[in-house]
Amino acid sequence: MLRINVILKAVCFIFCIRLFTDKRRRADGGTNGEITSDSENKGEEYYEKAMQHVRQHRWQEAMEAFDKAIELGCSHMAEAYEYRGSFHFLCASTDKALADLNKALELKPDFTRAHLKKATIYMEQSEFGKRFPVDKKILL
């Protein structure tokens, strides 16, 4: 049963990444997030490198690049924290995952993907009802 949960998490995570990167690829004109040599902000360069690694399914390199992007700062900080939180979640480090997802939501409160991943963690911990009380009006 545990193995099935891990596989389902990985499939959901890959689906989210592909959905996000396809939208991003269309938005940037199909450049696949290539980094130009005249880029001034190292944090931006590391974020773009991380996204390239994600598209190539090179998870360890992506995690390291997200760490560096967060350390140096970039314009996609919420997304970097959300991705890093996702990696922590897949590696069963739920405390680190929640910390990163909370930071992403602090930076971008309406970040739907971060809310969904946070809810997924709470559901797995059987704490969904405690952490996200369901308003009966919503269900009607």
Image (tube, grey):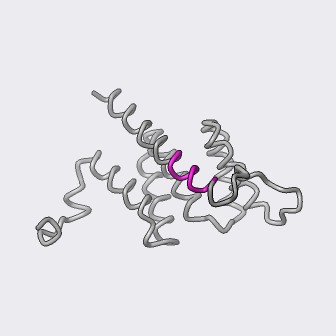
Q: Residue at x 42, y 56 (%)?
A: 98
| In-front residue for pair 84/55 | 55
Q: Which residues are magenta?
A: 17-25
Q: Quadrant of residue 71?
A: bottom right
Residue 30: where, in percent of width, then height?
69, 52
Q: Residue at x 32, y 56 (%)?
A: 119
Q: In the rendered view, tell whether residue 103 sits above or below residue 16.
A: below
Q: Is residue 29 left or right of residue 9?
A: right
Residue 118: where, in percent of width, then height?
37, 56
Q: Count the marks: how many?
A: 0
Residue 104: where, in percent of width, then height?
50, 64
Asked whether 21 falls inside the magenta stretch, the response is yes
Asked whether 81 falls inside the magenta stretch, the response is no
Q: Is residue 8 left or right of residue 16?
A: left
Q: Residue at x 50, y 65 (%)?
A: 103
Q: Quadrant of the C terminus?
A: bottom left
Residue 47: where, in percent of width, then height?
68, 56
By secondary structure, the bulk of the magenta-drawn segment is best described as: helix
Q: Residue at x 73, y 61 (%)?
A: 44
| In-front residue for pair 106/75 | 75
Q: Quadrant of the N terminus?
A: top left
Q: In the rendered view, tell whether residue 13 sits above or below residue 134.
A: above
